[in-house]
Image (spheres, rainbow, N blue to C red):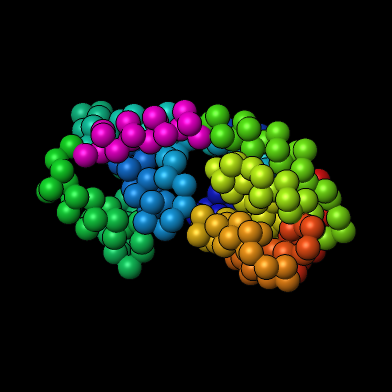
């Protein structure tokens, strides 16, 4: 996925395009939500607008069809005599998304027909709460973080005083700021919770997070660093 978007960014830059439009549908939304839930990540779906910055250029991704089912889109293509290009690898269930698409979704649908609409409606309701928490956490993150050479330092007592929903975001955002390549799929809430649990435990604990991120619990501080890259933090 990351490689595909890098190539899109490079092509868009070469052609002078301001955005790339994808044909992601409601079905893709459902698959994304299920994959995130099963992996222990935030269950949020795709965004209708995504802005990506990278070394290969600036890419704005628009997804105007997220409210349309895949079946409806295929019917429109058939009626309009348009030719759809199908990636043959989409049928290979060795890939996790394909397994969700061809096996998990049909299995859930047999027990809960039409579950997709209810699932996405629940996600939208959860987004309202998440937006409020994000706003509170953004202020806390800016206020509490101290940029140090190669990492970020937090006052341990102040992080412990935060509501868990806010504290988990603060720690997660620090890790994201330290990840060198922008990847974050393996940065699950389970790993973030491990840092918070250590902060409430004994001094000297070291929590290893994915992508070379390390959280060290000192007497008065939580110190997070990228031990592989030493990425500078803005």
Counting labels gives 0
- In the rendered view, tell whether residue 227 sits above or below residue 21: below
Q: Quadrant of residue 70 in the image?
A: top left
Q: Nearer the viewer, residue 193 or 16?
A: 193
Furthest-right residue in this view: 149
**Nearest the camera: 174 or 233?**
174
Q: Residue at x 55, y 29 (%)?
A: 132
Where is residue 41 drawn, in percent x and y? 46, 52
66 or 193, which lies in front?
Answer: 193
Q: Quadrant of residue 144?
A: top right
Horizontal arrangement in the rendering, residue 173 relative to residue 233 (left or right): left
Looking at the picture, how far across and down is residue 104, in whole percent?
24, 56
> Can see residue 169?
no
Residue 14 falls left or right of residue 69: right
Image coordinates of residue 87 in percent, x first then y, are: 35, 54
Q: Is residue 76 visible?
A: yes
- Is most of the magenta stretch helix, strand or loop? helix
Residue 72: x, y in percent?
23, 32
Residue for point 72% across, 68% down: 203
Name the image quarter holding residue 163.
top right
Residue 117 is covered by the magenta coloring: yes
- Check the image and report above or below for 180 versus 82: below
The magenta segment is 115-130
Q: Residue at x 62, y 31 (%)?
A: 135
Residue at the spot 78% in from the left edge and 46% down from the top edge:
145
Drawn side of residue 221 relative to residue 133, left or right: right
Magenta region includes residue 50: no
């Amino acid at each position: 996925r990351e490689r595909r978007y890098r190539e899109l960014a490079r092509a868009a830059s070469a052609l002078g395009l301001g955005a790339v439009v994808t044909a992601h549908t409601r079905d893709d939304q459902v698959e994304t939500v299920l994959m995130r839930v099963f992996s222990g990540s935030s269950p949020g779906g795709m965004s209708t607008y995504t802005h990506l910055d990278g070394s290969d250029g600036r890419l704005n991704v628009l997804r105007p069809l997220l409210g349309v089912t895949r079946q409806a889109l295929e019917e429109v293509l058939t009626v309009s005599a348009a030719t759809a290009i199908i990636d043959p690898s989409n049928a290979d269930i060795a890939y996790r998304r394909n397994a969700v698409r061809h096996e998990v979704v049909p299995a859930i649908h047999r027990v809960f027909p039409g579950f997709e609409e209810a699932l996405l409606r629940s996600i939208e309701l959860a987004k309202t709460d998440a937006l409020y928490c994000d706003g509170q956490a953004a202020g806390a993150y800016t206020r509490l973080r101290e940029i140090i050479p190669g990492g970020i330092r937090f006052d341990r007592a102040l992080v412990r005083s935060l509501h868990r929903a806010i504290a988990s975001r603060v720690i997660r955002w620090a890790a994201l700021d330290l990840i060198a390549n922008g990847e974050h799929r393996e940065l699950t809430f389970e790993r973030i919770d491990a840092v918070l649990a250590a902060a409430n435990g004994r001094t000297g604990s070291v929590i290893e997070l994915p992508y070379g991120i390390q959280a060290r619990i000192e007497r008065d501080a939580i110190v997070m660093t990228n031990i592989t890259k030493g990425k500078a933090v803005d």
